[in-house]
Amino acid sequence: MTKLAPLITGFLRDYMPRQRGYSPQSCETYAFSFKLLFDFAAKRLGSRPSRLTIEDLDAPMIVAFLAHLEQERGNGASTRNLRLAAIKTFMRYVEHKVPAALEQIGRVHAIPAKRHDQKLIRHLTMEEVRAILNAPDLATRSGVRDRAMMHLCFAGGLRVSELISVLTENLSLQHGASVTIRGKGRKERCLPLWKDTARDLRAWLSVRGAVRVPELFVNAQDEPMTRAGFEYVLDKHVGKAAETCTSLRHRSVSPHQLRRSCAVIMLQATHDIRKVALWLGHADIRTTEVYLRMDPSEKLEAVEAVVPPELRRGRFKAPDALIASLLSDLEAPA
């Protein structure tokens, strides 16, 4: 039996960051996937995660884990497929370390990704965004921070990982304010800032004070803001904004919806999907095309640009037999 602990340690600490050059955010995402898997496997086997072996992660165990994600954790098929992709990447690493497990690993690789419906993504209207951004109390330090943080997330169309990793040194508030973002695949992009966004960021810097960390946004303990911390902040202000904006009531707003809302508004303003892809930091423009499906104005322009066929017009004339049958129905006793 091959112990699992040294394999996963080598995978996350050496193979991914050093040999493959994965970013810390990617390593963190993979680590969370394996945390869920090991917790599930240990509970199912009545053991502890530190005592698991590679033989415990066979195909039936992985299939049961994927079902657990959907049925008990409420994850969608896309999240299920992401967890499966992380597991298969780890199994390819194990192939070279434990040749005796090749047959078992082959069965795991044979587990197919799940097809799923691609529904229209949800986003916020400008009125809803305005209500959320106006919710923080600007008379407090945390309120100034929350406004600046949510405003930058929306205006820049940032992922949560990008937002919380913005460094103070990468923010320029001089003439032509801009911020440098490091996104997926370690690709950097420089985004100009709206005047209102720059104003909120200046307000935050004026009360941020001297902190030890280089990150722009910090929590109450002056430690770097976390993903969970930002989700809590957003959820709190969405609840407050719902008091005045009825469309936000009983609605769950994720941080990614701020990013999507920025993309939709930018597409409506520019009508150029390439500019939206550059702004969001998409490596493949096909990823951005999802916003074309949800924007009716783009389809309306296509409809108006097409010359419809000229059809012969006419009027329907009911035959005498039909008129007679209708009259007989009306004269029939009830």
Image: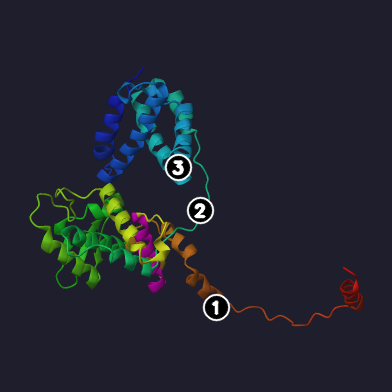
Considering depth in this image, is 10 or 316 the residue closer to the camera? Answer: 316
Instruction: Give the number of the disc on residue 74.
Output: 3
Q: In the rendered structure, which disc, 3 or 1, sits on the residue that comes first in sequence?
A: 3
Q: Residue at x 26, y 42 (%)?
A: 21
The x, y position of residue 94, in whole percent, is: 36, 28
Q: Secondary structure at mark 1?
A: helix
Residue interval drawn in magenta? 255-270
Q: Is residue 266 visible?
A: no
Which is closer to the viewer, label 2 or label 3? 3
Considering depth in this image, is 198 or 17 the residue closer to the camera? Answer: 198
Q: Main secondary structure of the magenta part?
A: helix
Q: Quadrant of residue 216?
A: bottom left
Q: Is residue 113 visible?
A: yes
Crowding near the residue tagged with mark 1, few <14, some 14–19, many ≥20 C-alpha atoms within 10 Å: few
On screen, residue 232 versus residue 109, left or right, reads left
Rounded to the nearest angstrom, the CA distance separating label 2 from label 3 is 17 Å
Q: Residue at x 44, y 41 (%)?
A: 80
Instruction: Give the number of the disc on residue 118.
Output: 2
The x, y position of residue 329, in whole percent, is: 88, 71
On screen, residue 216 versus residue 58, left or right, reads left
Q: Secondary structure at mark 2?
A: loop
Image label count: 3
Per the image, the residue denoted by label 1 is: 304
Q: Which amino acid type is marked by label 1?
A: Glu
- Image height of 229 relative to 271, above or below: above
Q: Which amino acid type is marked by label 3?
A: Gly
Do tag 3 and tag 1 residues touch (Cβ < 8 Å)?
A: no
Tell me, yes or no, whether the highlighted magenta stretch contains residue 268: yes
Q: Which amino acid type is marked by label 2?
A: Gln
The x, y position of residue 138, in whole percent, is: 20, 65
